Amino acid sequence: MKKLMPASASLASLSLALPPRAVHAAPRADGSDPKALIAAIQSAVNEMRDTNDKRLSKIEAKVDPLDTAKFDRISDDVSTLEASLNDVMTQLAAAKLGGNGNGPTNPEHTDQIKAYIRKGTEPTVQAAMSEGTDSAGGFIVPIEWDRTITDKLKQRSPIRENSQVITVGDRGFIRVYNDGVIGSGWVGETAARPETTTPGLSTLQFDLGEIYANPAVTQRMLDDAGFDIEQWLTSEVDGEFAIQENIAFLGGNGVNKPFGILTYVTGAANAAKHPWGAIAVTTVAGAAAVTGDEVLDLVYSMPSERDANSKFYLARASLGKIRKLKDGQGNYLWQPVTTAGEPSTLVGYPTVEIPGMPAMTTGNVSMLFGDMEKTYLVIDRLGTRVLRDPFTNKPYVHFYTTKRVGAGVQNPEYMKAIKQA
């Protein structure tokens, strides 16, 4: 399964191959220079829009399929460039903080983990501030290493990055909701004051699932390794965790995993789960596309007091279609990155590409719009556990790593969805 990785590869020789009739060469850019990347994005967007305008001018006659193919390829090019820009900005931000983006380190903790990885020497300093092993025989990893995994997950998982994330020390988390139903009325000076209705309280429980990774390496390699084995192990773990989290945060059924946000929309499995109802869905006319008016209708269906931190969440293929939309004056509704560190926008709101988000095909919920932090809650159980297993699969040493994570919709009123006809 392909891991969710930020696009960090150099785009110096990025090119798109088309048949001889129409050849497109993608803009060249220094993969580490934000200004060069922004210039490359602008150049690609201009060419992409010229291609789309030519395509639109041919609609009454006959559309050349090469125009459509060229637009799609440049659109994909733009997405790759934007991902590279985001990755560069993340690295620059980490450098300004004096680190590598993996959080603070403690030499004593780090040395113990490396000794445990190489030789199985038991750690004595624990994330939970206690010594020894837990009942399952796994070791609580030093908190700096645990934070490293969490930080990388945040970089790789767009839903985690945009959601509210809390850490708990218990088996789950319960939130109390007030239904806001309180009675009142107008009365005269001497009129009776009968009892009015009292607000009701309800609870919603967020259970934790367990996510694991089990990378393996030979003992000889551990003994002779000339590389940073701690970095290797965390990379293996957070890569696998990011894949599984992204799947669960979208469509998880709650069985040993979180409930995905798409399961809370109207008509889905958890539409009745939240005491405040489901995420409202607007069904558009097209089975494989949306119009500019439908996008605007979605935006204005969100009350103004709730849209301060709203963003669009959609798949890369859907983003490619959105880039073709125009308003009544012929202006494109999607705008590319113009400043390093800022996202591209759709009708003025940031866009977030979500791997695994359903495509624009019949019956799919293809787009979300709203404040993900107010809508979705991710719960981390304190501490990552690692069990070093040199016995099961000789000559390999397995590092069975587990982390307990829960998630679900905490407030459906801050999110809207588009569903294809």
Image (cartoon, rainbow, N blue to C red):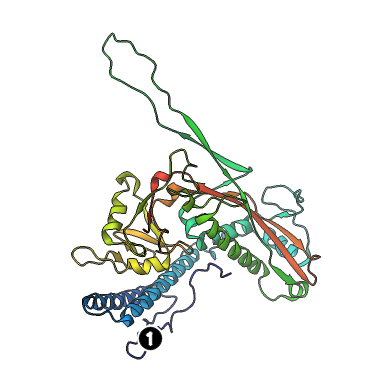
Q: Which residue is denoted by mark 1 in the rendering?
A: 18
Residue 265 x %, y %: 44, 49
- Residue visible at 48% across and 57% down? 159
Label 1 Cα neighbours within 10 Å, binned few <14 / some 14-19 / many ≥20: some
Amino acid identity at mark 1:
Leu
The quadrant in which the C terminus is found is bottom left
Residue 194 place in picture, x, y as percent: 37, 14
Q: Nearer the viewer, residue 170 or 187?
A: 187
Picture layout, residue 192 above or below residue 420: above
Q: Position of residue 35 (x, y in %)?
A: 36, 73
Mark 1 lies on a secondary structure that is loop
> Number of numbered discs present?
1
Residue at horizontal 44%, vertical 75%? 32
Residue 183 location, x and y as percent? 36, 23
> Left of 239 or right of it: where is 277?
left
Extreme residue in the left direction: 329
Question: Residue, x 22% and y 66% (percent of image)?
Answer: 331
Q: Is residue 128 above or below residue 176?
A: below
Classify 181 as above or below 235. Answer: above
**Furthest residue toward top:** 190
Left or right, 65 with respect to 145, comes to: left
Q: Quadrant of residue 143?
A: bottom right
- The image quadrant where one finds the N terminus is bottom right
- Residue closest to the eye, 312 or 284: 284
